[in-house]
Image (cartoon, rainbow, N blue to C red):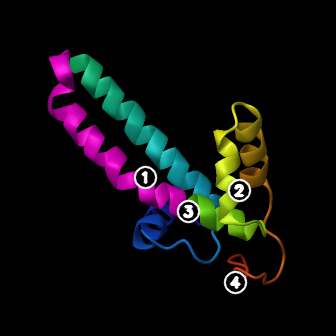
Amino acid sequence: MGFMDAVKSVYSNYFNFQGRARRSEYWFFYLFAVIVGVVAQILIVSTGEIGAGIFGLVYLVFILGTIIPQLAVAVRRLHDTDRSGWWLLIGLIPLVGFIVLLIFMVGDSKPGANKYGANPKGA
């Protein structure tokens, strides 16, 4: 799955917490969010406006509009590794939770179908 395909896929599955998501879908969308965030921060700082001005408002709307899809794709990614979406809560544990989630997200898909659906690599 390519960069733009991943972004389209995540936004087309906006509220979809069912099924599975490939590593490429998760990580390309994560990269997209980071790139937009960095560009927005550069624009906010370069304008020097108090309260971040229009760029700050646009960035806030982007953040609010991306929270649900980021959670949904993370849950689907955990499903792809045959884990429940509730494992996201381990991220609330400082440092250790981040490391555990990173290992889960980097891991390969479980081969074949699992209780969350068919393997997206085979589709």
Pointer 4: what residue?
A: 117
- Please state the horizontal and vertical placement of residue 9, each as a whole percent of the image: 48, 70
User: Mainly helix, strand or loop, the magenta region?
Assistant: helix
Q: Is 44 left, or right, of 123 in this rendering?
A: left
Residues packed near mark 3 inside 10 Å, few (<14), some (14 to 19) or many (20 plus): many
Residue 88 belongs to magenta span? no
State the residue position of label 2. Answer: 87
Give the quarter of the image for residue 118.
bottom right
Of badges 2 and 3, the one in the foreground is 2
Q: The disc labelled 3 sits on which kind of residue?
A: Val
* Residue drawn at the location 65% of the way across and 73% of the way down: 20
Q: Earlier in the sequence, mark 1 or mark 3?
A: 1
Tell me: residue 75, above or below residue 93: below
Residue at the far right: name it: 111
Secondary structure of the residue carrying tag 1 is helix
* Residues at marks 1 and 3, CA–CA distance in whole angstroms: 10 Å
Residue type, label 1: Ile
Q: Which residues are magenta?
A: 48-72
Counting residues from the start of the chain, the first of labels 4 and 3 encountered is 3
Q: Position of residue 14 (x, y in %)?
A: 42, 68
| Mark 2 residue crowding within 10 angstroms, few (<14) / some (14–19) / many (20+) | some
**In which quadrant is the N terminus drawn?**
bottom right
SS of the residue at dot 3?
Answer: helix
